[in-house]
Amino acid sequence: MKLTLKIWRQKGAQDKGKIVDYKVSDISEHMSFLEMMDVLNEQLVNSGEEPVAFDHDCREGICGMCSMHINGEAHGPDRGVTTCQLHMRMFKDGDTITIEPFRAKAFPVIKDLVVDRTSFERIQQAGGYISVNTSGNTQDANALPISKHAADEAMDAAACIGCGACVASCKNSSAMLFVGAKVSQYALLPQGQVEAADRVKNMVAQMDLEGFGNCTNTGACEVECPKGISLENIARMNRELVKASLIKF
Amino acid sequence: MSVLDSKVPKGPIKDKWTTYKDKIDLVNPANKRHIDVIVVGTGLAGGSAAATLAELGYNVKAFAYQDSPRRAHSIAAQGGINAAKNYMGDGDSTYRLFYDTVKGGDYRSREANVYRLAEVSANIIDQCVAQGVPFARDYGGLLDNRSFGGVLVSRTFYAKGQTGQQLLLGAYSAMNRQIARGKIEMYNRHEMLDVVKVDGKARGIIARNLITGEIERHSAHAVVVASGGYGNVYFLSTNAMGSNATAAWKIHKKGAFFANPCYTQIHPTCIPRSGDYQSKLTLMSESLRNDGRIWVPKNMDDVLAIREGKIKPIELKEEGRDYYLERRYPAFGNLVPRDVASRAAKERCDAGYGVNATGEAVYLDFASAIERYGKEQAKIQGISNPSKEKVTEMGEAVVEAKYGNLFQMYEKIVDENPYKTPMMIYPATHYTMGGVWVDYNLMTTVDGLYCIGEANFSDHGANRLGASALMQGLADGYFVLPYTIGDYLSDDIRTGPIATDTKEFDEAEKEVKDKIDFFMGNNGTKSVDHFHKRLGKVMWDKVGMARNEKELKEAMSEIKAIREEFWKEVKVPGSANEMNLELEKAGRVADFLELGELFAKDALIREESCGGHFREESVELEGQQKGEAKRNDSDFAFVSAWEYKGEPADAILHKEQLEFKDIELKQRSYK
């Protein structure tokens, strides 16, 4: 395949960015999208130009590092995949592909397609944990049976990879799917109950502080989420938040 | 050559760890506040260590090259984590897990370390459940287990096909709690480029801020390296693109011995490569071998017909298939350990029976599992005389519940539906058992410098069993290092903060800066990847699944030649004072180019076959084991620990003799 790529180039956080056109050829349909980007970068390095900076690591859809906005969609046109799992068979010979970073106020661009997602870190630090010391002197793992249903649902919420596609897809740049998933994982498990009220209040407060928007139930986040995290998690987070506001300690 | 002291405590193996913990020196809580510890790498080992040390009260500085600890490659582990809980009542025990691990490692690991690992394994599960890790459960609400290769019990705990992710998120959440308290200072997007020694002790590191390019000095009373394995020396591996050996190699150059570099695990169930552009290989959990049957056609005509697309694999009748693992290893069948399964696949493909265009693929077939599960479901649901379609439908649903995410991953990459046609698999580099040499305390040969997780060498011998990497990472970080490092740091309560404006830091920083300046100033003609790919090809062809003296010698000289060319011809665009991904890669590949040569040298001196290291000169010539790997315990029951002396070829060998007091050395038979 031969392709035209329109890629966002931005030298640094303070610089002005712009779309630059590149041509690549000899692209195989079996390549992953990032392998296509490797071809472009090898081409740029060989001609003495700076390669396009993009985040990536595991290249198997689990680390959550890759983050491109491809033809207007987070992680591109395929469903249920991250950019690294997107394959060139989704495109046709002669296509023009626009590649931009994830756009959100709380995700400032660092360079080219690389964005700063440490706002997610701070939300997790505000309460995304169970306060148990790692001494190993906890009770036996089977002392407390947990229904398979609850454990499976907690697992589905915990499958979030923290990539930020939900934020990038949302017209309000809301992080509620991300936060809802974490709140849900713990809300569904007995171990998470003790701190449930504080957790949801603190995480939501941090989310607002970071400049993420609110949820208006368009559901774009769920559609673009590579891990199929359900909107129900947002509803559950809102319920937990209401519940928390009614509890007096 | 000297003899290394592993500092294993005296006494019966069952009591060593308990007695050790009772006797070590402790640091009082008020003094811990005055002690700093640097942790490099925040995967399962580093993340759990950072969290635990911070909980104990030490001031921790943690470093990760990614933008968050949650991205470390531990996250990609799929199948599970072993623990000797014996919840299944199938005869498991601490001793049996210890025994399986030592046997699985082909008797090349240190007994005392492995016993300790088995001993703390059960705590890990308790700990993780308390942290909210959503392990799979059965309908009674208790934890479910499955079986992995090389063992006869079910002791593997799992969270769908994302066990590594869930365990890492557990350790990450424990870290977040400490970051919020200010006890961990987290340095994301930072890379350690050297260790700083003061009076022979590790007292800090030089790190590069990967966003600004700034070179920073960080001091501490002890340094812990938890930077993972060196599988990317092969260029193509199942490791993450950024996984590298730089931290481990830099400490090696500063005095830490590097042990058993030739012990590498080639994992049998990976998706075959499809072309030269390939950037990495994708692994699918070994748990697939619980239900998948591995085969190639019996007849060459069928092989050719399949390659040409004239017949489909599902059309080939049972009698035309060679289920070679079931044929060769009736006792373990498709669940033989990884090294055995990988070599068996290579043997069939080398004989010409590979089923794809490159000739490097075998089938992993779920048809009989789907039928079996479907019939079972029909019985459970009380459906008499179910149609074939109904059985298939119900069977597929069971397989989907067990392996759905893996099947989806396969389909996205290969563009074939594995429910309907067998998967194609081929071995790929996955894990490195070798690594920095450490004693029982997990301390390297440099005082105050520790190495944990995949980056060290100690627990897996010459071959790692499935679901044991997660166990080791968390055992080291949560339950072992926090004790052993305290014993060392108890001498440092009066030391006070370590200054960074000293000549030791000046020198280390200058060395780092000089190297960066060289890369930026070198007027080369070839990209970093160009050299990395060439190194990888030599490693795979000559230091891969089967090795021999002639090719190992060739590999050593070829790698040296590539390295020399690299330093002349490498080209790094951009500048040093900004995010520069090519510069990051250049430093890492420079280290791989040294490590690769030592790797080949280590493989050359080990004139025996053991675990993942298969020497073609050392095979059984007759009897039931004919053609299988032949270990040589009288000459090679030692750890080779290499001391850096400039060129990798000049490295000096030190031996740690392995003693087996609690396990009888036997031939590792899975027949």
Image: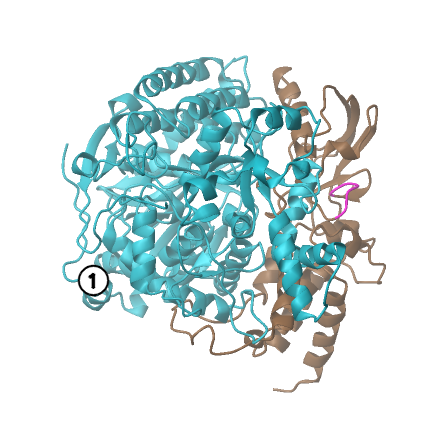
Chain colours: A brown, B cyan
Q: Residue at x 43, y 43 (%)?
A: B338
Is residue A2 shown above or below A107? above
Is residue A111 shown above or below B111? above
Q: Crowding near pointer 1: few (<14 within 10 Å), some, many (20+)?
A: some
Q: In the rendered image, is residue B239 in sight?
A: no
Q: In the rendered image, is residue A187 in sight?
A: yes
Q: Residue at x 47, y 71 (%)?
A: A132
Give the x, y percent position of residue B65.
51, 42
Give the x, y percent position of residue A55.
62, 39
Helix, strand or loop for the magenta stretch, by majority: loop
**The one of B624 and A41 positioned closer to us in this rendering:** B624
Quarter of the figure with residue B340: top left
**The one of A237 and B13 positioned closer to us in this rendering:** B13
Q: Amino acid at mark 1?
A: Lys
Query: Where's the C terminus of chain B, which quadrant?
Result: top left
- Residues shaded magenta: A75-79
Q: Residue at x 55, y 67 (%)?
A: A129
Position of B467 with respect to A243 (left or right) is: left
Is residue B395 shown above or below B576? below
Give the x, y percent position of residue B346.
47, 30
**The one of A36 and A244 positioned closer to us in this rendering:** A36
- Element at badge 1? helix
Position of B524 with respect to A182 (left or right) is: left
Q: How many numbered discs?
A: 1
Give the x, y percent position of residue B145.
49, 63
Give the chain of mark 1. B
Q: Which residue is mark 1?
A: B16
Quarter of the figure with residue B312: top right
